[in-house]
């Protein structure tokens, strides 16, 4: 293969250097998220090959040297010489910015849109990358490196170390890409196995029949577990013949379903392919998860709007046909039909436009009418089927009951508002507000227990820190209806303190504290209270989380004193490093709860912005969050018992990894 570098080529390589100058522009950030984005760029190329029908297996491996490998058994990246650029297809794809675009292939019409052009970006931001291609019984390899050029005293990005080599014969097929993220670019270079496996599982659900495996060969991270023995690397395999139908069953696994067989609908119209799986449970909440071309759309968009509009219309039509609604009755609301609904939907869209804060909202206007038409037709046919009439009847009656309750709740809320019950003085009595009047600077600590609340009130900086102690456990918001939530004193005091109101009346404009910090003990009770509060925010003030206002405060677990010197450890690993394994020369105190700290200690370790550690709660994975909440608080006892016994040590590494996965450490001494 010829590798003469002509002028054009050199320009191209300078393109990759630009990526290293401004990595954020290409992968969003150089933190955790950006690091994982690198992996998803490559995985997406493998998945695209599967969606095009050529690959059936995708394998992801985290290697002990910190690199990650992705393999698919598809056609293999082209190795032949590019007609105009004069170098191999492999070299073009991995060294040219915006190469590929999948060559405008019809098969790839539905790729993520954000993806498919990122292979060279991943190369530019790696210390090294190798691409192995197995094609026509030959094994080819090309290697790229980003190294310091001593002559120019600058780092050259993603340069081939030599031409594309032919290593020998093989019966394998496909492409294997392996790379080491560059630690001169990324703040963190360790992939999070849980995050990776969760996304791979999701991709397997979304791509029916595709087998995805995940292997973590790295040395286990030193953990709080007493067992020091390294666990053997285990390969996880995900393959779901039922696709999103299996996904919905998985989401509902810990709930009580109202019907065994999920409703499955699919169709295509005007270049939009749409699939949905729906199963109802006895819970009162609605869980709709939508995707566009395999990308989660947590903020919804035109496909969700189309789904909801068509669903409501078809169900109202059936309600009239079945005589449940009479001529003079008003239509039932969409919310009423979606109470207790768990749904997963995927729209395949050409040239998707993602909008919104987190680019999680589909903007293409042509998608709504297409989805509406597909769903109206498919859902009508589904319920006209005699085998499904009983379910139709059941769901409509359920919606009628939901409408009645909603009406009662609305009346209660209006009444509460007119009486300004939410503003009533006794409720805010517990709140120690701050003197500052700038919401963007103010912080509200929601503190478990009166005694810790007392310490926090004394220890705080009252200019910008407010304290709200919670007495009892607030109730579990997931299982309750709005009127009951409003009836709970602990929740009412939270709502009043925040100033946002809730649910349909929620408004971020009223928020009085831009940091809402949950401070609870590092034990099971504390984890439970935290989960209840997060569920409440998740259900009734979702924007508070998505806009990044919710944090978890991290009190230290240990106090280590040597002479006059006091240090704090926030987990067992830190303790080990502070004590360096020795038993002597210091006194150790283990904090069992916040209440054991005096006001000065609480300030110094947990509240002082210059010293404390906070985790920002984001809903990386609403599906997982929903599951955790259900497990901890749903009505099935066994999954809860199992979860608690598996996570008996409610330390911070584990207890909220499922909920607050994209957590950011805000500050740290
Ligand atoms: C582990 C990553 O990249 N597989 C892969 C990629 C490609 C092809 C096959 C392919 C596509 C076509 C023809 C075509 C390509 N990706 C790109 C780009 N796995 C992985 N497997 N022959 C093979 O599109 O017609 C271009 S080709 F640019 F998106 F990276």
Image (cartoon, rainbow, N blue to C red):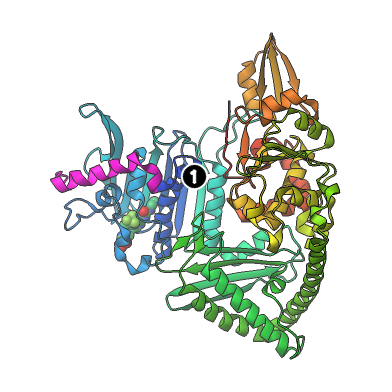
Which image quadrant for residue 48? bottom left
Q: Is residue 242 visible?
A: no
SS at mark 1 in the image: helix
- Left or right: where 222 falls relative to 323: left
**Camera-nearest residue between 523 and 19:** 19
- Left or right: where 147 falls relative to 249: left
Residue at 20% x, 56% y is: 82
Check disc 1: other Cα within 10 Å, few if <14, some if 14-19, many if 20+.
some
Residue at 33% x, 39% y is: 21
Q: Is residue 425 above or below residue 539?
A: above
Q: Is residue 28 visible?
A: yes
x then y, percent, for residue 43: 43, 52
Q: How many marks?
A: 1
Can you say which quadrant of the picture contains the C terminus? top right
x then y, percent, for residue 363: 47, 66
x then y, percent, for residue 418: 80, 63
Which image quadrant for residue 364? bottom left
Which region shows up in magenta?
1-26
Residue at 32% x, 61% y is: 102
Assign ligand 1 to one image quadrant.
Answer: bottom left
* Ligand 1 contact, mark 1 (Cβ < 8 Å): no
Q: Is residue 232 above or below residue 268?
A: above
Q: What residue sits right under mark 1 in the picture?
A: 33
x then y, percent, for residue 620: 58, 50
**Camera-nearest residue between 167 and 331:** 331
Which image quadrant for residue 516? top right
**Camera-nearest residue between 77 and 633:** 633
- Please name the predominant secondary structure of the magenta segment in the image: helix
Q: Does the magenta run of residues contain 577?
A: no
Q: Is residue 358 above or below residue 234?
A: below
């Amino acid at each position: 293969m010829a590798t003469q570098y002509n002028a054009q080529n050199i320009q191209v390589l300078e393109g990759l250097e630009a990526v290293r100058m401004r990595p954020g522009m290409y992968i969003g950030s150089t933190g955790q998220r950006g690091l994982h984005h690198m992996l998803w760029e490559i995985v997406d190329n493998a998945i695209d090959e599967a969606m095009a029908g050529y690959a059936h297996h995708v394998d992801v491996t985290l290697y002990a040297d910190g690199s990650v490998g992705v393999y698919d058994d598809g056609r293999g990246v082209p190795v032949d010489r590019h007609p105009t650029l004069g170098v191999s297809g492999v070299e073009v794809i991995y060294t040219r910015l915006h190469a590929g675009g999948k060559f405008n292939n019809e098969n790839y019409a539905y790729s993520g849109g954000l993806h498919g052009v990122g292979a060279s970006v991943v190369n530019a931001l790696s210390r090294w990358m190798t691409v192995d291609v197995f094609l026509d019984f030959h094994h080819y390899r090309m290697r790229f490196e980003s190294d310091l050029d001593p002559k120019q005293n600058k780092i050259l990005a993603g340069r081939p170390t030599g031409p594309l080599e032919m290593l020998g014969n093989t019966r394998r097929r496909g492409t294997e890409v392996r790379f080491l993220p560059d630690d001169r670019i990324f703040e963190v270079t360790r992939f999070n196995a849980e995050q990776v496996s969760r996304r791979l599982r999701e991709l397997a659900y979304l791509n029916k029949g595709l087998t995805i495996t995940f292997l973590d060969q790295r040395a286990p991270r030193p953990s709080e577990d007493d067992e020091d023995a390294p666990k053997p690397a285990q390969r996880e395999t995900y393959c779901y013949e039922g696709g999103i139908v299996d996904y919905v069953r998985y989401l509902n696994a810990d709930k009580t379903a109202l019907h065994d067989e999920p409703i499955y609908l699919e169709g295509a119209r005007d270049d939009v392919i749409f699939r949905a799986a729906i199963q109802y449970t006895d819970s009162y909440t609605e869980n709709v998860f939508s995707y566009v071309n395999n990308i989660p759309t947590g903020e919804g968009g035109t496909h969700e709007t189309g789904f909801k509009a068509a669903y409501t219309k078809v169900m109202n039509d059936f309600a009239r046909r079945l005589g449940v609604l009479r001529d003079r009755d008003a239509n039932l609301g969409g919310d009423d039909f979606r109470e207790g609904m768990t749904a997963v939907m995927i729209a395949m869209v050409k040239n998707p436009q993602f909008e919104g804060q987190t680019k999680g909202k589909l903007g293409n206007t042509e998608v709504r009418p297409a989805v509406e038409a597909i769903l109206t037709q498919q859902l009508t046919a589904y319920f006209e089927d005699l085998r499904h009439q009983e379910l139709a009847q059941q769901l409509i009656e359920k919606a009628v009951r939901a409408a009645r309750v909603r009406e009662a709740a609305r009346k209660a809320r209006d009444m509460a508002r007119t009486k300004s019950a939410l503003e009533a003085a006794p409720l805010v009595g517990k709140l120690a507000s701050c003197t500052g009047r700038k919401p963007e600077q103010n912080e509200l600590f929601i503190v478990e227990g009166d005694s810790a609340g007392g310490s926090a009130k004394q220890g705080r900086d009252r200019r910008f820190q407010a304290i709200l102690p919670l007495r009892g456990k607030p109730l579990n918001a997931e299982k309750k209806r709005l009127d009951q939530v409003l009836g709970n004193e602990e929740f009412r005091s939270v709502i009043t303190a925040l100033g946002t109101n809730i649910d349909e009346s929620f408004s971020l404009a009223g928020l009085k504290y831009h940091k809402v910090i949950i401070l609870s003990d590092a034990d099971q009770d504390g984890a439970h209270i935290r989960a209840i509060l997060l569920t409440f925010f998740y259900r009734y003030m979702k924007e508070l989380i998505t806009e990044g206002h919710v944090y978890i405060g991290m009190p230290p677990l240990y106090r280590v004193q040597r002479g006059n010197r006091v240090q704090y450890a926030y987990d067992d690993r830190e303790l080990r490093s502070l004590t360096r394994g020795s038993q002597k020369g210091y006194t150790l105190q283990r904090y069992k709860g916040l209440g054991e700290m005096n006001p000065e200690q609480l300030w110094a370790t947990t509240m002082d912005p210059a010293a404390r550690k906070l985790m920002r709660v984001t809903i990386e994975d609403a599906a997982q969050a929903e599951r955790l909440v259900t497990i901890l608080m749903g009505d099935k006892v066994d999954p809860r018992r199992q979860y608690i016994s598996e996570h008996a040590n409610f330390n911070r590494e584990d207890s909220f990894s499922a909920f607050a996965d994209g957590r950011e450490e805000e500050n740290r001494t």
